[in-house]
Image: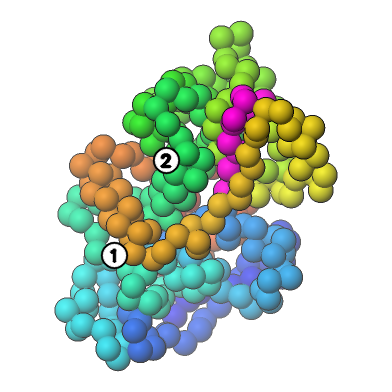
Amino acid sequence: MQAVVIRTFGSPDGLEVVDVPVPDPAPGQVRIATEAIGVGGVDAVIRRGTLAAHGFRAGHLLGSEVAGRVSAVGEGVDAAWTGRRVWAFTGLSGGYAEQAVAAVEEVLPLPAGLTCADAVTLGASGVVAHFALDRARFAPGETVLVRGAAGSIGLTTVQLAAGGGAGAVVVTTASAERGARLRELGATHVLDRSGAGGPDAPHGFDVVIDVVAGPRLPHFIDRLNANGRYVAVGVVGGQPPADFGGRLVDAFRRSLSFATFSSDTVPGPARQAVRSAQFADAARGVLRTVVHEVLPLSRAALAHHAMDAGTVFGRVVLTP
């Protein structure tokens, strides 16, 4: 079968399509004939080599979420899974392939009306958005900033904050066209990537959900209101300055909070319960998914070039 691996770290051109054996599901696993593969920010971070210290090596098969039909089950798994349309989390590898394996507890059946492309657009990102707002202790009436709002995590966070009664949902994005699309999803104010906006844009925020990090992170810490909470859920813009914590200490009397968040720290059953509810909401049109583009698996490098260029709005989906 075909799969995409990292031949060399750095540029997307280091991705290579190779032939690999079809994986056999181990005990407790299912194998899925993939119909849609999500291209996530973590894939780009791994490919760039940023996480090389965590054991990623040349030949790594990218991909963490897929959707398709179960083609085989491992020992101890109910055979009734065979043939079902499912979404699955494959870990930090194995998804960019025609067939992928996943632990059965990381698999969810898809409701009627939800496409495989929609599932991999929402599956991992929706859970991050939900629990990041929970970690930030978001309450109705508060002003929320979503930094890096054009990605799949940001788009879902905007919708959840708006639906949860935020007093204002402020976003940072790269263009007026993107800002208009974000307003359709619930944003009330649009800032550019530097944080500049119109005269009516809030200057201070009660909650910041940040997918970007990078060198501008301290600037947004400075704009937290008293008792403000900042939750970083990604580093797609690179690492923040090493001394950014000094901003929190300097603002000691404002009682600011900073946290990082990974959905890995949420118990599996809780993740799956939220994901299942979000899939149902998306199937009914209550929660909107945004697919930027669907590309063949063989063009994974093109998808990564688009991510690096910052031109993706929503999520790129690969198909075998």
Q: Overall secondary structure of the magenta stretch?
A: strand
Q: Which mark is residue 156?
A: 2
Three-letter code for the amino acid on which mark 2 is drawn: Thr
- The colour style of the image is rainbow
Residue sitting nearer the eye, 25 or 22: 25
Residue 171 magenta:
no
Magenta-tinted stretch: 222-234
The residue that disc 1 covers is 108
Q: Secondary structure at mark 1?
A: strand
Residue sitting nearer the eye, 223 or 253: 253
Point 17% across, 54% down: residue: 112
Question: Residue 28 appears at what percent x and percent y?
Answer: 34, 84
Question: Residue 303 appears at what percent x and percent y?
Answer: 55, 53
Residue sitting nearer the eye, 181 or 299: 181
Q: Which mark is residue 98?
A: none
Point 39% across, 88% down: residue: 26
Point 72% across, 49% down: residue: 238
Q: Secondary structure at mark 2?
A: helix
How far apart marks 1 and 2 lie (CA) works out to: 19 Å
Left or right, 207 with respect to 258, comes to left
- How many numbered tags mark residues here? 2
Ranked by sequence position, the earlier of labels 1 and 2 is: 1
- Based on the displayed image, in which of its 4 quarters is residue 51 positioned? bottom right
Q: Residue furthest front?
A: 253
The answer to whether one can see residue 96 in this image is no
Label 1: how many residues lie within 10 Å, few (<14), some (14-19) or many (20+)?
many
